[in-house]
Amino acid sequence: MVKFTATVAAMLVASAGALAPSSTSYYYSVRESSTALHMAAEQPMSKRQRTLKHLTKIAGAVASIALATGGAPPAAFAAAKKGKQAMEVVESTNTLMTLIKSGTAKKIVAGAAAAYAAVAIGGEVIGKNKDSGDSTEKNTNAKQDFLEAEPYWDQSNVPVNIYSNKAPFTGKVVSTKRIVGPKATGETCHIVIDHKGDFPYWEGQSWGVIPPGVREKDGKPHSVRLYSIASSRYGDDMTGKTGSLCVRRATYWCPELQAEDPAKKGVCSNFLCDTKPGDEVKMTGPAGKVMLLPEEDPSTDYIMVATGTGIAPYRGFIRRLFVENTPAANAYKGQAWLFLGVANSDALLYDDEWQEVKKKYPDNFRLDYALSREQTNKSGGKMYIQDKVEEYADEIFNKLDKGAHIYFCGLKGMMPGIQDMLKGVAESKGLDYDEWLKGLKKSKQWHVEVY
């Protein structure tokens, strides 16, 4: 007697792919369901009637609970338990290929699949402790592979501008946290936003945020502001239902008042940094493709240069490559090199995360900081981001010659200094800087997103 937990589960998954919304249909594996059906075709014919009767009852119960209650966690977990029973009930049966041909069996499988899909898509089953039944315990070893293209590096269907200014998405704030120390030059916050899985994006893209209210000068709604997404597509909780932003509160110091002038503060950044759990945020996008990771060659080196909150897209990159259990992480053999420029140690962003990655992957992740108020460059002046990059100029040029990709993100004021430095290095090597840069752009190795 052979148990068919995996077989029926695969059938439910296959059916769920057809019943679920199109945005989530790629969560499921047709290959696994095909294998399961092939296995089932070899089985004897003894328990068909009893199996169908039992499965009918369970499918009805699961569908009633899961589909009627939507996102209510207790009911969702009850449905998950029923779904698990449905998968375990079949010990041996007639060829499931034959069962699937019958109208009754189709309804049964579809009902159970729809119910299980409702729970799974809702994300409440992920991380469930199947031995203890404790639904709150997170499975940190779970794979992050349910939001991948096929193959994972294919960028032909990257989501772009799903939501617009006229028809924005409304997300809800999960948490807002200050992430810099007391001596930092300004306040920077990490904001997690719940999008319920309805706002897919890829690492390197941006969300638009429309602050509430209207402009004082003309009474029109505020315009959208773009913010680089600071999480992977799976979100910080790895459910695929949240995304994060890294936002610095924009303020204006008035020299006459010798105080901050609230009339000139950044409308959107202050709105975001002041949000509390449950607050609604109107959003557009996702926007942009210029900062995407080229993942087809897993040996590609990535050089990531940031100032301040320009660190945001790189956090998504690094989580995808080193923190999460993604196909990209499992395949990656190259080196990711992060340069971050801030004023002082208290202004460092996500340092604890970078140090953990560096500890675990010393050969694949490098980290360099430019602290303008604490370090000096080779000339004795303040250490800015271009000075830190210049210290490794030979190595960086060599990596670029071998196909590495270089990224720049942050305030637009960073680029003149960066380009002047690169031009000087190129000329010292006997290279025509303009032609060299043209070659990088042509091969799509040069990525810039500044604001």
Image: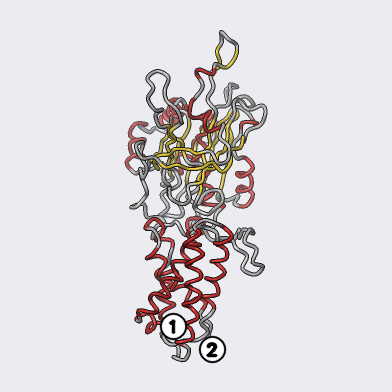
- Comparing 121 with 41, the one in front is 121
Q: Position of residue 32 (x, y in %)?
A: 44, 72
Amino acid type, mark 2: Met
Quadrant where the N terminus lies? bottom right
User: Residue 420, relative to residue 177: is it above or below?
Assistant: above
Cα–Cα span, label 1 and label 2: 12 Å
At horizontal 57% and vertical 63% (from top left) the residue drawn is 77
Q: Badge 2: few (under 14), some or many (20 or more) residues near its Cα, within 10 Å?
A: few
Helix, strand or loop for disc 1:
helix
In the drawing, does residue 297 fall left or right of residue 376?
A: left
User: Residue 293, relative to residue 307: is it above or below?
Assistant: below
Q: Position of residue 385 (x, y in %)?
A: 53, 30
Q: Are marks 1 and 2 in contact (CB under 8 Å)?
A: no
Amino acid type, mark 1: Ala
Residue tagged 2: 1
Q: Position of residue 231 (x, y in %)?
A: 51, 45
Residue tagged 1: 40
